[in-house]
Amino acid sequence: MVGKSDLDDLSWRFVAFSPLLIYFLSLYCISVLDVGAGEVDSKMEGIETATGDTALSVATQGAAGGVGPEAPKLQIDNLEKVQYTAGKSLSGFKAGDLVRCEIEAKHITQDNLGIKERRIWGNEPYTDDSDLVAIAVHSGIITPTAEPPKFSVLVMIMRILEGQSVYTSSMRNSLKSRSLTGYEHKGLSMRLEGSAICKTTEDEAKLTHVVLRPVRLERYSIKSHNAFSEARVIFSLSNEPAFKYSLSVVADRSPDAKYWTSVRLQTQSMYAETRDRKRYELSLENHVQGQPATYRFAECLKPRTTSKAVIQEAGVPLPEADCTIVEKGLLWNQIEWGVSSVRIRGNVYKLACLFFLPNSSPVSTGKE
């Protein structure tokens, strides 16, 4: 016979161990999500800016990250070279020009006047007289210390643009740029297109390409350095684990190109669900070496009854019979990720969650 005191004791034990049960249940859900979402790599937490001992040699830059698809690249071997000196501007160029700027490691310290005096105006684009070391810090390429970093040269590829009407100030990577109006600056502007860190002068001489830097949208901010550190698990329309949408999940933030969403889409397809209970597929449409990749955006049919297994049986990306094509021939910069939505060619889709599936061929049913 169980007495009242025994029941009270059992109730107390249940309450005491409930947090542990919830914790282990959460771990199980996350592990299921990792498998279902295309084996998300759990080693992303080591992301940090390439400085000092973490500098990347361009001799192995083509295989940044060791595995995974190749990142979009920009050919630079035929560009005009400009050696950095403090106070030197990129005047004398015209809008549309690409300039290869080389900064010796001795200039990259906390004592650099461009950093100390904040000789930087704007926020991608910057004025053409902004200090290149300050731009490198503001853009997150390097983090200066008291001593020069342990590499030879930092190469920055700058694209010259028309002058802007306003250059806005922003705080990024512990450096605040200055604001300016077009009336105060009569010159042109410039934007960082790509960069590379060369450990030796030999590496610098062999450098012919850099990883193309994704366009940064000023109105969006990214607080996390780990693309999945802020991810939350929710359930999709087909009642399966998925990432709750956030900008940190899709942003091309990592210095390691294999973690960029634009690179992951070369071997996987993304499935994003909207708040109005629709599911869309974003997949690579065409990618030829030396040419911009294009993407397809399609609406999936019957998302509530179409599980991940069913999608993979049909083939990833989905054949046209199983989806409705919304947009074709999309360039990456036409896909504008926002805090709670994505804008594609002027159309806004408010997102709830997303997941990735590896590209695969349709599964044969054995029926004729």
Image: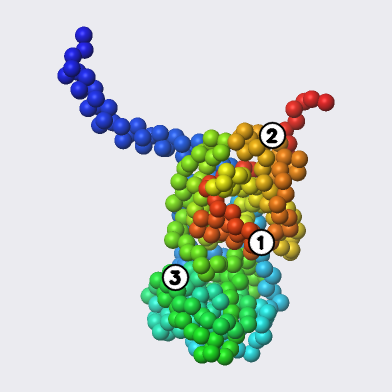
Check the image and name the residue furthest to the front. Answer: 276
Please name the residue shown 56% across and 76% down the image: 125
**Position of residue 224 measured from the top left corner of the image (x, y, whole percent):** 44, 58
User: Where is mark 2, residue-wise?
Assistant: 313
Dot 2: what SS?
A: helix
The C terminus, quarter of image: top right
Task: Tell me the SS state at disc 1.
Answer: loop
Lower sequence index among marks 3 and 1: 3
Give the number of the disc on residue 172: 3
**Direction top: furthest residue:** 1
- The amino acid marked with disc number 2 is Glu
Q: Is residue 99 visible?
A: no
Q: Are marks 3 and 1 in contact (CB under 8 Å)?
A: no
User: For numbered disc 3, what is the local secondary structure?
Assistant: strand
Q: Which residue is mark 1?
A: 345
Mark 1 or mark 2: whose residue is earlier in sequence: 2
Q: Which of disc 3 and disc 2 is earlier in sequence?
A: 3
When asked about the image quadrant of residue 91, the answer is bottom right
Residue 153 at x, y percent in the picture: 54, 75
Report the mark closest to the observer, 1 or 2. Answer: 1
Question: Residue at 31% of width from left, 32% of height from top?
Answer: 18
Distance of label 1 from label 2 (alpha carbons): 31 Å
How busy is the neighbourhood of tag 1: few (under 14 within 10 Å), some, or many (20 plus)?
Answer: few
Q: Alpha-carbon distance for marks 2 and 3? A: 45 Å
Q: Percent from the top left, x then y, of residue 82? A: 61, 83
